[in-house]
Image: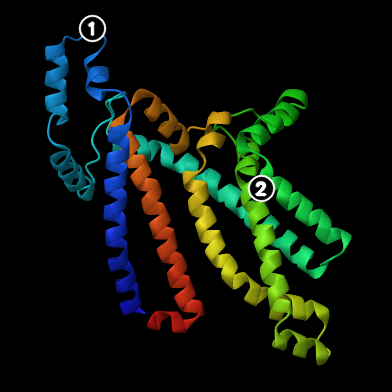
Amino acid sequence: MIDYLIRRLVGTIPVLLAVSLFVFLFVHLLPGDPARLVAGPDATPQDIAAVRADMGLDRPLVVQYLRYLGQTVQFQLGRSIKTHQTVAELIGERFMPTLLLTVFAMVWSVIGGVAVGVLSGVKRGRWQDQLAMVLAISGISFPGFWLGLLLIDLFSVRLGWLPTGGYESWQSFVLPAFTLGTGVAAVMARFTRSAFVEITAEDYVRTARAKGVPERLVVWKHTLRNALIPVITLTGLQFGFLLGGAIVVETVFAWPGLGRLLVDSVSYRDYPVIQAEILLFSFEFVLINLIVDLLYAVVNPEIRLR
């Protein structure tokens, strides 16, 4: 198991290097001059040139990238052009709200999605199955910003039950977590149903039923446990998607998280923050994929030999 872990860790190094290069190039292709923003609207060309030299933007891209890579490895992410805070401080302040929102959204979407998927698989072809799949397709089809605005209008403006945004109490989590997790719950339901139907066609399930095993035990012990194995992969990938994909939801609900920080940073051409956030989101995906691979290796030891 240790050898497998080491191989997987070594395999992530080229991925992270490639991601850092793409992030660096992408940010530098954005229109606008950060040196001009830092210098201010009344700055002379000489002032702008001095700021550009101080920021290292007058050097060749290769030199800038190597400098950026070296600083990243040492966790020196620079300072925000807009607020002059260190990027690490900014991300640290915004990380917990995004993480909590993602966890709340993931918990309800996994529980709800798996439950709906199992119900749909057990009642395959019946009205419960058709209703569940209609709900799943609707959940995938609804844009997050539209669903969020609809929920705000209904539960906040008309009924006054929940706040429209903010980060003050547990009520603030309800609408954004539901909005963020709806698409994931829909995907989870369809994926669980597909895996459930596939497992029910296996010989050992038919044998259990032929032996007279109660249907409840067939569903929960023989079918569901094996159907959840591929769901582990989907759960990990969707968790990474939620962490990096909360931009729209955080903007709609004025949520003080990483997604809203990224939107503000792009508007201001805040290069250091943009680079750090995109790199962080990419690292989260790599880390989650590594954890999923390790879970697979625990469930199926044959994977360790590949």
Amino acid type, callout 1: Asp
Does dot 1 land on a helix, a strand or a loop? loop
Q: Quadrant of the C terminus?
A: bottom left
At which x and y percent is residue 57? 17, 30
Q: Nearer the viewer, residue 277 or 137?
A: 137
Residue 296 to residue 286: above or below: below
Relative depth, front residue between 185 and 25? 25
Q: Which residue is mark 1?
A: 42
- Residue sitting nearer the eye, 260 or 58: 58
Residue 232 is left or right of residue 305, and the answer is right
Q: Of callouts 1 and 2, which one flags the residue occurring earlier in the amino acid sequence?
A: 1
- Residue furthest to the top: 42
Q: x, y percentage for residue 268?
A: 36, 23
Query: Callout 1: few (<14), some (14-19), or many (20+) C-alpha neighbours within 10 Å?
Result: few
| Disc nearest the viewer among 1 and 2 | 2
Left of 109 or right of it: where is 235? Answer: left
| Residue beneath disc 2 | 140
| Residue at left offset 13%, top offset 41% | 63
